Amino acid sequence: MSEQRTIRLIVTRQDDPDSRPYQEEFRIPYRQNMNVISAFMEIQRNPVNAAGEKVRPIQWESNCLEEVCGACSMVINGRPRQACSALIDKLEQPIRISPMNTFPVIRDLIVDRGRMFDALKRVKAWIPIDGSHDLGPGPRQSQEESDWRYELSKCMTCGVCLQACPNVNNSSDFMGPFIVGQVNLFNAHPTGALNKDERTSALIGEGGLQECGNSQNCVQACPKGIPLTTSIAIMNRESTRFVLKKWLSF
Amino acid sequence: MNEKCIIVGGGLAGLMATIKAAELGANIELFSIVPVKRSHSVCAQGGINGAVNTKGEGDSPWEHFDDTIYGGDFLANQPPVKAMCEAAPGIIYLMDRMGVPFTRTPEGLIDFRRFGGTKHHRTAFAGATTGQQLLYALDEQVRRYETEGKVTKYEHWEFLGIIQDDEGRCRGIVAQNLRGGEIRSFLADAVILATGGPGIIFGKTTNSMINTGTAASAVYQQGVTYANGEFIQVHPTAIPGDDKLRLMSESARGEGGRIWTYKDGKPWYFLEEMYPEYGNLVPRDIATRAIFKVCVDDKLGINGENMVYLDLSHKDPKELDRKLGGIIEIYEKFIGEDPHKVPMRIFPAVHYSMGGMWVDFNQMTNIPGLFAAGECEYQYHGANRLGANSLLSCIYGGMVTAPNALAYIRGLDKHVDSFAPDFGESQRKDREDQYEQLLNMEGTENAYLIHKELGEWMTDNVTVVRHNDRLLKTDEKIQELIERYQKIDMIDTSRWSNQAVPFTRQLWNMLQLARVITLGAYNRNESRGAHYKPDFPDRNDEDWLKTTLASFTPDGPKFDYESVDVSLIKPRPRRYDVAKKGAANS
């Protein structure tokens, strides 16, 4: 091939939380096995836009580059996903990239996902152990129990399910689909089950399960294939039981 | 009394230290450049070692200890390694109680699999994303302490350096908020660094983007001794990529995966042939050199390229999904082929640093009050780390460091809260001035291109096979890059969420540490563990059974050596073609 192939990227940029977003186009020399991240790295080495103007390189978050850390979520050709596993060869061009704007934008593609970590605090997403001293092994668990919890435990807090969910928006305070899976994860553990009502109660509190509109976008968007809608069904049953129990105990 | 402790880094070591310190009543300020849940520990795949001996194989912590010392080619000081192996079963049980979804046996017990450098099933695992699952469990416990007010997190903050008092004791840190840009001092009587390895010095590796070694290098330049820097582990099985080299866990071989290439038109299982006793489960340095030899010297890589097969296609697909799902998914996503059906194509990649900050048996560096735990220190792996020992050494390191740090604080005559109100301000101001200088750099060089060049030189000359002439040339190259660094053009001068200036600051630290690694390798004229020189092919205990100690000077690293504590297991030749003779259990 005589002509150098190029990749076209159209990136939605924003200088800071208060400024207006704008689009900028980049043309990058093509190499084999590139992903969206390596295209961005090329811009760092040569920060020039398609018009030939020197610009500030794109700001984005990424870390592991193998889809386990959850850092590099963004919207690529209309779909929220991890940028590291977005292979250039599989994307239609021009590739349009924008931040997951269901979260506050910090700069360019960087968003503030702090609300997700706050939600984990609200639902007490942990096993309350007595202490880290040596108390022997934990409770025995069947392969099935453990495998089910492992599926739920792959959640990287990446935020893709919140971006995909129509019920996470300005007029709702829904904590997001991921949190349902997390409550399910801890309630399904033999020790975690001892105080599952605390978590269930938090899950049906403000911004909880009742905000879910059952669009089922989350389960399709989740990069880890976490069974979120199954979890939502399980937690719906568990909260009904919880509410009845509370009502009967009056 | 509520001691205050600063912990930098939120991977396994930092989070475990945080939990221990919080349990002991301390108040902790925890710093991390990324949300701690995104730390590099998430990338660990295969598992965590502990001689729980539930398979009727007669395994024991002593056997684990002996495998680790032998696997590390006798370069590790032995008492701390023994203590770690003894603590290992308890650590696995603790993680189990925290809810880690370990893969189970039919009886409901934690399952164990084999790993390199041992004959025992000693590795507990959660599919093939064990590091992620362990990290999440610790992250959850830390979050619990956060809600109780014992832990304050500073995420998206970068550690810039320590603050020392007139006696040279560490009394706090200077850190920068990577969003707003403000540079602040934080005071405490003890600081624990748990900041991970320096892999990114080698450019494309199996490491995460944050593993630049910048924190360790910053304190090295402040006087911390850096030990065994030349011992860099190159993992035998990674998949080449344009942005990084993605790890394919050793557990693939632990579960029966075989390495081969074509020779004379037929599959050649060269590890099984060369090392009949351990076969595909030789330690990483051995497997890497064999693959390197087959591809580079014998030109027998797949289609003449630098690649061989890692084959799982003969295994039961359901079992593969349960035990190795995580890595199979990575291969499918990034390469587009199905390892259930076709062999994976792999090649070695820089993976781990055995070397790191020198620490004493209490995990304290040579600067009083500054402690280190996890990959950033040098203590547990000698000249080569065994697979699945890193998650153990990180958690164990964090576990013992925090109580030691608090004991140190309690033993002090005066505490930092009694110091003058402006204590630390001048050291903070220095870092701020440095930032302003970086922000205003005008020139012709691009920091990211200098880094690329550094990585290529380091990977070509300071990894699997080392020659003294090339090591010297590499050091000259690094010095040239240090000169060119002065001419960097700052490509982003914004004061809000600027990534270019912090990267440029990290690049300086990478260049300094690169010299420690390269010259340490140049000086060590022997072959031991991951350090291999064809001109000096044998281990030389008489001259080189000693720890390399590098200290910073403005003219480059100065090297000293100290003897290794081999008080428990007498050094013996290390071979994997025949069965290991066990050391006498004293």
Image (cartoon, coloured by chain):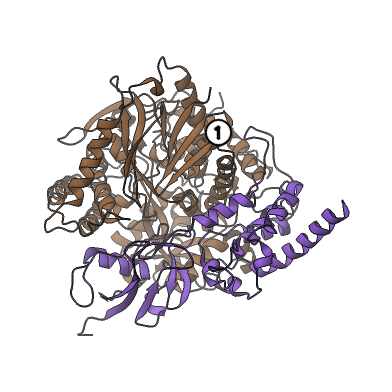
Judging depth in this view, the residue of B120 and A192 nearest the camera is A192
Identify the image quadrant of residue B349.
bottom left
Any part of residue A215 in sight: yes
Judging depth in this view, the residue of B396 and B136 nearest the camera is B136
Q: Position of residue B127 (x, y in %)?
A: 59, 57
Helix, strand or loop for disc 1? helix
In the image: residue B369, left or right of residue B48: left
In the image: residue B452, left or right of residue A80: left
Q: Residue at x 30, y 29 (%)?
A: B424
In the image: residue A196, left or right of residue A83: right
Judging depth in this view, the residue of B261 and B217 nearest the camera is B217
In the image: residue A175, left or right of residue A32: right
Q: Residue furthest top?
A: B413
Q: Position of residue B413 (x, y in %)?
A: 41, 14
Name the residue beneath numbered marker 1.
B22
Q: Position of residue A219 (x, y in %)?
A: 60, 71
Up-down: is A195 above or below A71? above
Up-down: is A2 above or below A76? below
Up-down: is B98 above or below A69? above
Q: Residue at x 67, y 56 (%)?
A: A183
Q: Position of residue A69 (x, y in %)?
A: 47, 57
Q: Residues within 10 Å of mark 1 (few under 14, many from 20)?
A: many
Q: Residue at x 39, y 25 (%)?
A: B369
Question: Label 1 marks which chain's residue?
Answer: B
Q: Amino acid at mark 1?
A: Ala
Q: Colour of chain A?
A: purple
Quadrant (top left/top right/bottom left/bottom right) for the C terminus of chain B: top right
Q: Colour of chain B?
A: brown
Identify the image quadrant of residue A245.
bottom right
Up-down: is A3 above or below B393? below
